Amino acid sequence: MVTFLIRRTFGMIIVLLVVSFVTYLIFFKIPGGDVAGRIAGKQATPGNIADIRQKLGLNHNLIVQWWDMMKQLLSGQLISYYDGTNVVQQIKEGMPATFSLCIGAGIIWLGFGILVGTISAVTAGGFSDRSITALALIGISLPVAWLGLLFRYFLAGEGGGVSWFPDGGYVPLTANPWQWFYHLLLPWFTLAILFIGFYGRVLRSNILDTINEDFVRTAKAKGLSGRQIMVRHTLRASLIPIVTLFGLDFAAVLGGGAIITETVYSIQGVGYYAAQSIHTQDLPPLMGVTLYGAAFIVVFSTLVDVAYAYLDPRIRLT
Amino acid sequence: MAERLLEVNDLNVRFATEDGIVRAVDGISFELERGKVIGIVGESGSGKSVTAMTLMGLTRGVNARFEGEVLYKGTDLLQISDADMQKFRGNELGMIFQDPMTSLNPVYRIGEQIVEAIRAHEHVDKRTARARTVELLRQVGIPNPESRVDNFPHEFSGGMRQRAMIAMALSCNPSILIADEPTTALDVTIQAQIVDLINRLKDDFDSAVIFITHDLGVIAEIADEIIVMYAGRVVERGSKRDIFYDPQMPYTWGLLGSIPRLDRPRVERLHTIEGAPPSLINAPEGCKFRPRCPHAFEKCREEPRLDNRVGTPGHLDRCWLDVEFKRATRDKTISGGSVEAA
């Protein structure tokens, strides 16, 4: 276990370095021209641009520039090209909103995903199963941006519908727990619906495979009830692949992947910050957000492996 | 006379499939008394496992149709609800399966799985159930059961897993132990140990055993009565002595001929029964074994009833051939066709 963690930590650092370098290269290859020229504005003299290049350290070679940026990021000194704000500070400020959105949505999608997947498998071929299948496919196919707008239009008083819910925005948990919850309900479901449909489908097919396993027959031959067999034997085995999915999906949204949901509901989290930075082609925040997201992915994939070893004793961590 | 535990009367099991009705079991009857071992022998697809699973209520489903009676101590197990059947499974009838590698749940400890079986039927606390589990593991010959009880299935060898399965099946002291090919997936040396173990535990637990196998050699040791099944039907039934020394069905000869034996002249090759078992959807007319039987004649197009044709009480078969003819010809099949007088 210790060797495993040391090895994985080492691997994670390498992955993050590679991710950051590739991000850096991509940024300088995308259209948009010279960063210094863009910041200097339309009326800039060549002298202005040269000054800015000097200030941003753009005259060094690419590796040195990249390394300087890494050092600034790790020491928390990285400053946006565009508005001069501190990147690490901005990400930190966005985290509570992003975490609130993602943890709530994660609980909802995992819970409902397991529920609909199980119901669907138990009633396989029947009416409930067919209805759930149809709904799941709709859920998977709905674009999140459109679904968010639909919710706002019909449920949040934006258009012709009722206004049962506040129309976007975020209230910190510490400020008012009820308002926090109330403001997040629609975003939670907006983010969760895609995953509910997807997890339900995956779990359904896992359960239908597991039901035919010999050990499920043994459980029945022991005289366990249908519910005990389902929960303790079938579901237990069927959920193992769901753990992988959840670990990685959850890491992705925590790492700023809920860009659309955050943007639609004006929740100023990390995803919102990423969206703004893409809009202004601001490299330092993008670098910060990318590495922040990548860090979640690598850490959670390690956690998934540890969870696997716990859930399936045949797996050894080496 | 010993207590009669089980009486199966003309059991029929059919499954509706997309291709048609599968007559998996077509009229099997037998009785089982406490302390006895009945062996059910046949190829894959002969209906022996379906019979066993039906006794346990494991074949119930929307596509299954049952006829006949399965009387366990007077209760017809085919008529009771699945919820009531649950009280019999594991408690009155215990079952061991073919593949011990997959029959245990890989994510739970051996002990947990046996404790679960005990607590499914008896209201005992975990500590008591665990103590009993250790004792059961000792009885089935697991060395050092106090620590082995906490192992996972993958930490056990195949033979040990099958022993653990036996311990689980016996954990609630069932009156009947159903062993569905319990030795097929094991090494030959382990097979003998498992058969001996079942035989010994049957007496310790005062139960009866239904032992299902495709290998007559395996049950030569322990069966009191043997039922030979073919294509869902009983084709021959009799005492161990009848089946081994006076077999009446050419199919039984084939099974006997395919066992390697040291007390017979050495043959180049063991006997093989040519062809494959018939489809259970469109079974051949008359004797089901006719297409594969080297001795088939005109009369075999007519369905032979399961009848006593030999004279020995209780020895039934479904074969039209003349008994004396069979006694004269069968050794060729049983001891190997190409053998010279040794």
Image (cartoon, rainbow, N blue to C red):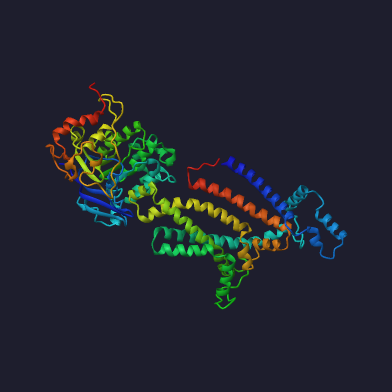
State left or right for residue A194 relative to residue B105.
Answer: right
Measured from the top left, where is residue A52 in percent x and y? 83, 58
| Residue B244 visible, this orientation | yes
| Residue A171 visible, this orientation | no
Vertical order, B285 against A265 (above or below): above
Q: In which quarter of the image is residue B305?
A: top left
Measured from the top left, where is residue B78 in percent x and y? 24, 54
Query: Which residue appears at 36% of the width and 49% of the height?
Result: A217
Vertical order, B289 against A149 (above or below): above
Vertical order, A130 against B152 (above or below): below
The single residue placed furthest to the top in the displayed view is B342
Return the residue nearer the eye: B77 or A174.
Answer: B77
State left or right for residue A279 relative to residue B283.
Answer: right
Query: Which residue appears at 76% of the width and 58% of the height?
Result: A79
Report the number of numbered marks: 0
Return the residue nearer the eye: B261 or B330.
Answer: B330
State left or right for residue B83 relative to residue A126.
Answer: left
Return the residue nearer the eye: B218 or A225.
Answer: B218
Measured from the top left, where is residue B272 in percent x and y? 29, 34
Measured from the top left, where is residue A59 in percent x and y? 82, 52
The single residue placed furthest to the bottom in the displayed view is A160
Return the residue nearer the eye: B63 or A152.
Answer: B63
Q: In which quarter of the image is the N terminus of chain B?
A: top left
State left or right for residue A315 relative to residue A173.
Answer: left
Q: Quadrant of the C terminus of chain B?
A: top left
The single residue placed furthest to the front in the displayed view is B298
Query: Which residue appears at 31% of the width and 28% of the height?
Result: B269
